[in-house]
Amino acid sequence: MVNSMNISYDSYRVFYYVAKYQNVTQAANRLMNSQPNITRAVKNLEGALGCRLFVRSNRGVRLTPEGEKLYAHIAPAVEHIQAGEEAVAADQSLQSGMVTIAASEIALRCCLLPVLGEYRRGYPGVRIRVSNHSTSQAVAALRDGLADLAVVTAGDDLPKGLSQRRVRDIQEVPVCGEAFSFLRGRALPLEELSQYPLIGLGPDTVSFRFFSRFFSQHQLPFRLDIETAAADQILPFVKEGLGIGFVPEEFLQELSSPTPVQELSLKDPVPKRSILLLKRERQALSAAARELHRMIMQRRNPEKNLSLL
């Protein structure tokens, strides 16, 4: 039995190219080596295997029956290795690959979407998979290895094993439709605002817990008259005069002008919230994910450049 541990991959690679081209000179050129070195490598392989692999012909060399049997096994292996090397090289050059990112809706619209557009234009060969979740669901997806990165609004404590960076802050404001237009034009106490119907995300969300804490700081309960399943559903309900909602200022910038939805002023403004970029601490990122991570962090608030949570 041949001791394969004594035969290197380079020896089989030399054999592969000599057999493929049936010419030692062409194999040497392809391998960027000298013809004597290629000939020596073939003879060493024949010695290790205990048989001749090539015989000389008028046009170069041809395989012996033993060489043909060996080539039938070696060729697929070498070609698979080459394909793997090329795939890794393509991933590293961002010509291919895939990145998966979990995002809460507010983080997606206020931060991530512009970055993804820029990323797509720069690296069209990389596939992007975005899963739109609540913050807690996005964190769970990242923790369970279903996403490379997560972009979420700050809220609950993170599970162990995840790290976070602050990307930017968002300012949420109360908005109303024509039905509550009489509230515009003055700074409203939160106590007065709480007397009107409120629209927002349900109790199982980070947003609900955030506003509950805000209202509690003013000794007020946070009670919703209408619970929506997603943040982008708040404005349509507000527009129809069903109540007052809190949305990021960016949501208002997306509205066409004129619009029946108007911002209200609070005597005590809503505290700013942060958008965080999360990743697993001990998980190495692919080249595609590393580049997306870099591009997201480039968009952070200038005054937060040194902020690391």
Image (tube, rainbow, N blue to C red):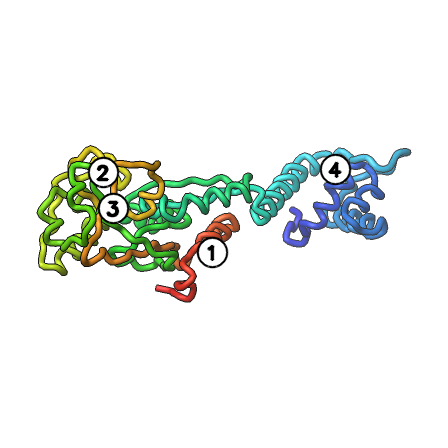
Q: CA distance from mark 1 to mark 4?
A: 57 Å
The correct choice, above or below, for 282 with respect to 50 in the image is: below
- Mark 1 packing: few (<14 Cα in 10 Å), some, or many (20+)? few
Task: Give the residue furthest to the bottom.
Answer: 306
On residue 263, which mark appears?
3
Q: CA distance from mark 4 to mark 3?
A: 80 Å
Q: List the residue tagged with mark 4.
A: 67
Q: Are marks 4 and 3 in contact (CB under 8 Å)?
A: no
Q: Amino acid at mark 2?
A: Ala
On residue 298, which mark appears?
1
Left or right of 156 on screen, residue 84: right
Q: Earlier in the sequence, mark 3 or mark 2?
A: 2
Quarter of the image for the C terminus: give it: bottom left
Q: List the residue tagged with mark 2.
A: 229
Q: Position of residue 245 (x, y in %)?
A: 20, 44
Q: CA distance from mark 2 to mark 1?
A: 31 Å
Q: Earlier in the sequence, mark 3 or mark 1?
A: 3
